Image (tube, grey):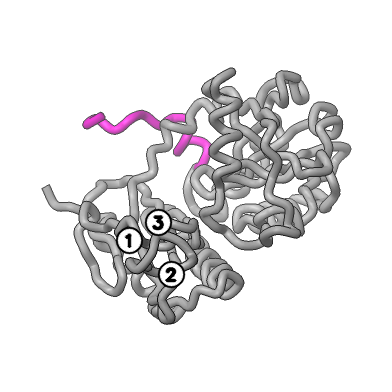
Amino acid sequence: MPEPIAYLKGEYVPASQCVLPIYDLGIVLGAAVTDFFRTFNQRPYRMEDHIRRLYQSCKYARIKPPVSYEESLAISEKLIAENSQLVGDDELGLVLYMTAGENAVYAGAAGMPSTLVPTYVQHTFPLRFHMWQKTFLEGVHCVTPAPRHWPPQCISSKIKNRNRLHMWIGEQEVKQLDPDVVPVYLDIEGNLTETGGSNFVIYRDGEVISPRSHNILWGISLTVLQGILADLGIPFVERDIQTYDVVTADEAWLPTTPYCLGPVVRFNGETIGNGTPGPVWRRVLDRWSEIVGKDIYRETAESSPPSNT
């Protein structure tokens, strides 16, 4: 059976051969930035925005991309065009990953070579929407774990990076209590920030409130949400959000790339609204569907596992 291709350090290779050596600094030091976008009707969605953010992250991380922005676009388009032929009507997710390069001299920072060549990876995978079916049908339960979000004084929240050990620990902590919960992280002052894979907003008193931009990775989906809310005449504001604001909100949502917008129906065990996905969420999601030319609700809520699993 044909194998999808991936891009690794200037070459197109079979996906099974897209691997990093153990001394790559993305593994040794976590010196890596990343991004991710998806297709709709097998066409890339907001690809330019995601790749532009990757390059901005690279600049902040002092990692110089080995190819131009335009070349990155061409690589992504090629992977989607070729790999879509292998997945029937399925949609693809595309991951971009840039590390500081390989350091075979020493497994840390003390023996760094004078010149590093960044490692650039792109690869795709079929999106399995049945994984999020329960999200749409029943809603999400979010819980705040003990580990706090990285403060922006340590590393900018504006870049998408691989330094996520605190999120891994937080996720394992809450899933020991309930495997279906989604952790949302507080900052050191007790304000909500984001989850490991989405932004977090609330709908309260007729407006949508997002945590302040300095404290979160400002998602491309959050930008799309802003535009939709403007079309619908719903105010969007940035403000510090505490747990009180969430449990007394009318609705809460997770803007994210794979399924666009998920409803949150419980928070730290307490019901939000009436405990079911809310009407404003569905109104926004339906407008999102009009924009992308596909029924996002049906795509996820009526999905089923692939027949070969």
- Counting from the top left corner in percent of width and height, residue 12 is at 23, 67
Q: Is residue 29 magenta?
A: no
Secondary structure state at the residue bearing disc 2: loop
- Residue at 67 percent of width and 22 percent of height: 276
Residue farthest toward the front in the current orientation of the protein: 110
Sequence-first tag of 3 and 1: 1
- Residue at 65 percent of width and 46 percent of height: 199
- Residue at 69 percent of width and 32 percent of height: 146
Mark 3 is surrounded, within 10 Å at the Cα level, by few (under 14), some (14 to 19) or many (20 or more) other residues, namely many
Tell which tag, 1 or 2, sits nearer the viewer: 2
Q: Is residue 60 above or below residue 303?
A: below
**Separation of marks 3 and 1 at Cα, in angstroms:** 8 Å
Identity, as a three-letter code, of the amino acid under mark 1:
Ile
**Separation of marks 1 and 2 at Cα, in angstroms:** 39 Å
- Residue at 74 percent of width and 20 percent of height: 271
According to the picture, the residue beneath numbered tag 1 turns out to be 80
- Counting from the top left corner in percent of width and height, residue 135 is at 55, 29
Q: Is residue 76 visible?
A: no
Q: Is residue 236 above or below residue 129?
A: below
According to the picture, the residue beneath numbered tag 2 turns out to be 111
Mark carried by residue 164: none
Q: Residue 81, located in which quarter of the rendered image?
A: bottom left
Query: Which range of residues does the magenta coloring cover?
Result: 296-309
Q: Is residue 62 visible?
A: yes
Secondary structure state at the residue bearing disc 1: helix
| CB atoms of marks 3 and 1 within 8 Å | yes
Tell which tag, 3 or 2, sits nearer the viewer: 2
| CB atoms of marks 3 and 2 within 8 Å | no
Identity, as a three-letter code, of the amino acid under mark 3:
Leu
Q: Residue 15, located in which quarter of the rendered image?
A: bottom left
According to the picture, the residue beneath numbered tag 3 turns out to be 94
